[in-house]
């Protein structure tokens, strides 16, 4: 069985997935001593290791029969009630249990939405940029992707409306609109309250289901949160995905989805042949942790730590990229990422090459753009590196930036010509980019 | 958002999934005091609750950083090494780590095989009957199913060859052959050594990949195991799926796949957008359990318990269905199921209705037949019920059988006419039947 022979057995979707770019990059990034600003991982200091070590033995002795057995596909009844209450506390009033199901982290929520709603060729509207795992999940279902620019206040609702009109004219009627409204991965920006309302009006007008992917909402360090899309939803059009990965720990692979009962029922049916049920062991661990009232303290200490790291990263950027570098960046009020925009004449891939020479890694922004734009942008993570690494990492990044600038020379520093991008693109490269980003993330694991 | 409106958003594959039959049945089976011979669950007595309660705290204190964090998509390196060794001990010599990946139980292995190999319309050859979760996973990918009869020695290799010739004549070239060689779910039968060799020769001749689904292989109570297909595979054509669900506990949702490196690489790429990684918490729990050498004792006590339950069930069948009932059943040497064949004039659905009146549940055999045949067969589980319940359950089943016989009357006891079944069928009903079986299973949870 060699790779060429295997080719003849592959499904259409597997055949479209290539992996060439990754392997080259992996050789560069798996060097020792690299400071990675590339990952998307929580800081291990936030993990409730000791609390779990104390809680798990009695949990097993009392609930082992359920925790070690198969469980219902829609999730443990008591955990569903716990996350229902958690969601209701965030402003989703009158939430009934039939609107809640447990998923194997929110990545599975994305995959199930793809399976339930997307036939190959169907279009999904997403931000430019967007979370790569979502683009990957929709692309694996054969989706085409239509990107709408994101600015400091989230997805541009004016351009969203115009894009939908243009798509309709060319015969494309997207089914889904995908957004991360709070501290978006990768930009860190939050969708403004006004745009949230506009977005829902547009979704109703163009008959779109809205996927609200919400892993970071509770990780706010300054300011106030606008209402969630789930709280604003009046006609059952919003599917909200939540996860314990960023507020408790990712090793659980545990999330939940909130949607209209009919949608929940479809998602649960689609989940059956995928994994029968999410790990009851993980579910009972999370449930007992919540029942014991231990979640708020973990979220509090996570917020305190990340707030300090956020300041460290923003101060480092001010210090090393201040003045006339032409580099801009977002100032997120929460989450785990800062988004950097280089002068247009600098390609982030060239910067990554120079950065890796100085042993600093980040993710190039074009990876998050379904249409391949965003070539002079990049994503920096501040949750995982230490404060010392954040400062040193940004310092080296600034040196690498100077390396690139000096190689380019002043005469070539012309803005790139604005290329006309297609309205809707095939998602097949998103899967490749997902693999690339995971490779970068795993480097620091 | 009502069900009718939602319909317009559904993908082709979701639209084909109906759930009517289940709800009716659920009302019947969720009565209290039902003895369920329907499930497929391990006995909770086999769960290593106390061993885990002792092991987990020190595990968390030593390995919490990895257990609570994200992990590699292909699985924890040390766990891969542990399961590699476990597989090698079972006769798969020279097994390298690049031929092993961790999955979120073997159900995910089935789903990933579907995604990597099946484009809607592609055909899969499977047993008549077959494990419903596999039919569901392949059907969700749009597969067509071609069934080949199973007898007391496993899938009929003579008919397999003939079926492949016939399919080829009608222009259908299946890509995959799906088998559970050891103590098959649902029949309990084991594929003979001779047929294993024949099957691999036929697979090479007709250029099929073979999926060997092997959850029960270590649960042998009498006799000797023929070599696994993985051990006999000489050209990298076999993909073997293993799971901890039946030999440790299902709440882990942890399995592994053994295949050619190129296939492993494709399966791992397909896994990325599905769940990023399998729960590192569950992986580290399993790994430390294995490293501590605690698995053999769990398997031993599981074997001892199930061996006694198997005898109890076979003796109850002898006692209550002996003589001239015309009822036949398999005598499996391991696993968790006995397969019952009623006289041809008795429909198992009629028997189920009468059985539920007497508060006994089982799964009708036609659910496991992709072509809807097998109407006078049924599956009985002996791993979960107590020995007393096994005897009482079979006793009531025999009473229900007499109820059905007396209603039919002697004159109608003619064998059904043999209907000509199509060579290959759409898999869309398999998903419905999977939901049904899960509903039956969850009843006893």
Image (tube, coloured by chain):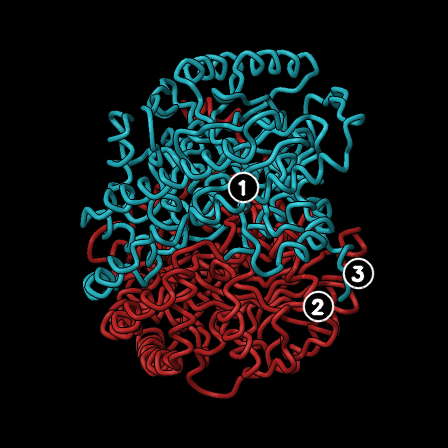
Chain colours: A cyan, B red
Tell which subunit mark 3 falls on: A
Tell which subunit mark 2 falls on: B
The total of numbered circles placed on residues is 3
Of the pair B56 and A350, the residue shown nearer to us? A350
Q: Is residue A143 above or below residue B112?
A: above
Q: What percent of the width, then of the height, locates residue A132?
A: 57, 39
What kind of element bears circle 3?
A: helix
A327 sits left or right of A257 in the view: right
Indicate which label's residue lies in the foreground, 1 or 2.
Answer: 1
Indicate which label's residue lies in the foreground, 1 or 3.
Answer: 1
Using the rendered view, name the quadrant where residue A403 is placed. Answer: top right
Using the rendered view, name the quadrant where residue B441 is placed. Answer: bottom left
Crowding at dot 2, Cα within 10 Å, few <14 / some 14-19 / many 20+, comes out as: many
Residue beneath disc 1: A394
N-term mark: 1 or 3: 3
Q: Residue furthest bottom?
A: B223
Residue beneath disc 2: B237
Residue A270, disc: none
Is any atom of residue B410 visible in this view? no
Q: Are marks 3 and 2 on the same chain?
A: no
Crowding at dot 1, Cα within 10 Å, few <14 / some 14-19 / many 20+, comes out as: many
For the point 78% across and 62% down, the residue is B165
For the point 37% across and 28% down, the residue is A260
What kind of element bears circle 2?
A: loop
Tell which subunit mark 1 falls on: A
Residue beneath disc 3: A5
Indicate which label's residue lies in the foreground, 3 or 2.
Answer: 3
Q: What percent of the width, then of the height, locates residue B445?
A: 29, 57
Q: CA distance from mark 1 to mark 2?
A: 49 Å
The answer to whether marks 1 and 2 mark residues whose Cβ atoms lie closer than 8 Å is no
What kind of element bears circle 1?
A: helix
Is any atom of residue B150 visible in this view? yes
């Amino acid at each position: 069985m060699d790779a060429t022979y295997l080719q003849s057995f592959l499904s259409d979707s597997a055949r479209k997935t290539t992996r060439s770019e990754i392997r080259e990059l992996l050789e560069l990034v798996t060097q020792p001593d690299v400071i990675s600003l590339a990952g998307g991982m929580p800081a291990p200091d936030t993990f409730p290791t000791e609390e779990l070590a104390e809680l798990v033995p009695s949990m097993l002795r009392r609930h082992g029969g359920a925790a070690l057995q198969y469980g219902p596909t829609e999730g443990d009844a008591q955990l569903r009630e716990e996350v229902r209450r958690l969601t209701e506390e965030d402003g989703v009033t009158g939430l009934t249990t039939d609107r809640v199901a447990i998923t194997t982290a929110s990545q599975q929520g994305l995959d199930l939405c793809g399976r339930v709603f997307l036939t190959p060729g169907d279009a999904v509207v997403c931000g430019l940029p967007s979370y790569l795992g979502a683009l990957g999940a929709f692309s694996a279902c054969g989706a085409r992707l239509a990107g709408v620019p994101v600015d400091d206040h989230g997805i541009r609702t004016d351009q969203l409306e115009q894009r939908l009109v243009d798509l309709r004219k060319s015969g494309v009627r997207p089914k889904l609109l995908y957004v991360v409204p709070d501290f978006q991965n990768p930009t860190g920006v939050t969708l403004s309250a006004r745009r949230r309302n506009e977005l829902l009006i547009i979704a109703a007008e163009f008959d779109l289901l809205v996927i609200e992917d919400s892993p970071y909402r509770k990780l706010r360090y300054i300011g106030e949160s606008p209402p969630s899309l789930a709280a604003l939803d009046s006609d059952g059009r919003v599917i909200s995905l939540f996860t314990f990965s960023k507020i408790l720990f990712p090793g659980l692979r545990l999330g939940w989805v909130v949607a209209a009962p009919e949608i929940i029922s479809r998602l649960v049916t689609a989940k059956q042949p995928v994994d029968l049920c999410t790990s009851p062991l993980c579910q009972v661990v999370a449930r007992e942790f919540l029942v014991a009232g231990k979640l708020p303290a973990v979220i509090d200490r996570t917020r305190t730590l990340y707030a300090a790291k956020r300041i460290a990263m923003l101060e480092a950027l001010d210090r090393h990229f201040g003045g006339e570098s032409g580099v801009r960046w977002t100032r997120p009020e929460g989450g785990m990422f800062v988004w950097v925009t280089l002068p247009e004449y600098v390609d982030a891939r060239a910067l990554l090459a120079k950065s890796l020479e100085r042993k600093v890694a980040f993710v190039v922004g074009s990876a998050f753009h379904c249409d391949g734009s965003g070539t002079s942008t990049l994503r920096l993570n501040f949750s995982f590196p230490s404060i010392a690494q954040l400062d040193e990492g940004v310092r080296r990044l600034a040196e690498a930036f100077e390396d690139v600038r000096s190689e380019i020379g002043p005469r070539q520093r012309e803005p790139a010509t604005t290329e006309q991008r297609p309205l809707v693109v095939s998602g097949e490269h998103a899967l490749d980019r997902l693999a690339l980003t995971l490779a970068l993330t795993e480097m620091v694991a």
